[in-house]
Amino acid sequence: MTQVTQVRGKTSHFGLWWIAVGAAMWGLDAVFIVALLHHFSSTQIVMLEHVLLAAFSFPVLIWKRHELKALNWGDWGAVVFIAWGGSAIASILFTAGFHYGNANVVLIMQKLQPLFAVLLAAWVLQERVRRGYWMLLVAALIGAYLLTFGFHIPTAGSHGNLIGALFALGAAALWGGSTVMGKRLVSKVSFPTVTALRFAVALPLLIVIVAAQHPQWGTMAHAVTLGPVLANLLFQTLVPSLISLLMYYRGLDGVRASYATIAELAFPATGLLINWLVLGQTINIGQWIGFAVIWLAVLQLSRLPNEEPGRQVKRTMKMAQ
């Protein structure tokens, strides 16, 4: 018998770019979701996507069912967290924040998501980051602010701001926590399994939420719009949902959660670019600078060591000669 030692946790520069590209693909839905909102509510769209994603999730879970035995109760709690908290509840809180509070306040609070991810990674995963990381985190947060507002200083009214800010903070905490919980899971099971679990576990909750809203499905009966609507929905399901998350979790296996949360800022950066190219929205010089700052931060982050010296964890596997 021979022993093959695999060093896990070493620097994965490519992993960071898997995450950044996967997150960037989330920004592609901005163009197509506008058309779908003429036929469905945002919750209906997410639920329909998960119904279609069941064609991927359940076969993968059957194929990879042996991996599920490695998950303990804490791991299953992480699955519920990313499926219910990150996919469903966070989106509801973020949307409610716009309803109750000032939009500028909501957007500013949402930009604090990386801070939640760093704090939770230190607590849950015992991650410690290098000094150079904090400079990049501050730069990325400044870039995210500029990306949203440019050099404009947003003003906020008083009515409902506290409630809106709390909703946005809740969404930011759930999204940041989902990064950490996803990192916990990919260390135990393969990235297709994590992706399938996220979709499969989220579906029952989404069905309940949509049913409670008593939706109208009448527009699906019109054959004139049925083809384009289904094609649009299929794109939403395959690209910004399935392929992007497969890439995201593929990269997360070799990247620390605190690093991944900066790479995720590629999402609003790409969304801004798509809105400019396709929807014709105006972008000011401050937003262009924010766009450049975020991608330069990701580039510089990919050059930093992904683990501290002496903190590599060795996995030993026995293989037959």
Image (tube, helix red, strand yellow):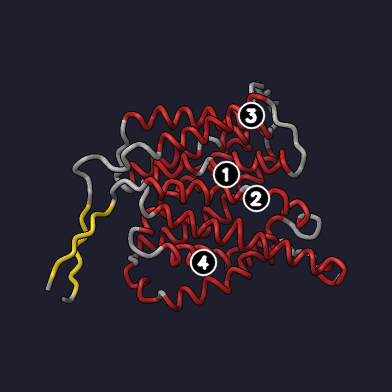
Q: For marks 2 and 4, give the one nearer the viewer.
A: 2
Q: Earlier in the sequence, mark 3 or mark 1?
A: 1
Q: Position of residue 42 (x, y in %)?
A: 70, 55
Q: Earlier in the sequence, mark 2 or mark 4?
A: 2
Q: Earlier in the sequence, mark 4 or mark 1?
A: 4
Q: Quadrant of residue 309?
A: top left
Q: Are marks 3 and 1 in contact (CB under 8 Å)?
A: no
Q: Earlier in the sequence, mark 2 or mark 1?
A: 2
Looking at the image, is 60 positioned above or below residue 181?
below
Circle 3: residue type? Gln
Q: Quadrant of residue 240?
A: bottom right
Q: Nearer the viewer, residue 84 or 275?
A: 275
Measure the alpha-carbon separation of dots 2 and 4: 24 Å
In this figure, which residue is indicated by the disc labeled 2?
28
**Pointer 1: residues within 10 angstroms few (<14), some, or many (20+)?**
some
Question: Seen from this angle, which residue lies furthest front?
Answer: 321
Secondary structure category for the residue under label 2: loop
Circle 2: residue type? Leu
Q: Position of residue 197 (x, y in %)?
A: 47, 66
Circle 1: residue type? Phe
In this figure, which residue is indicated by the disc labeled 4?
201
In this figure, which residue is indicated by the disc labeled 3?
287
Measure the alpha-carbon separation of dots 3 and 2: 18 Å
Secondary structure category for the residue under label 3: helix
Secondary structure category for the residue under label 4: helix
Looking at the image, is 161 positioned above or below residue 263?
above
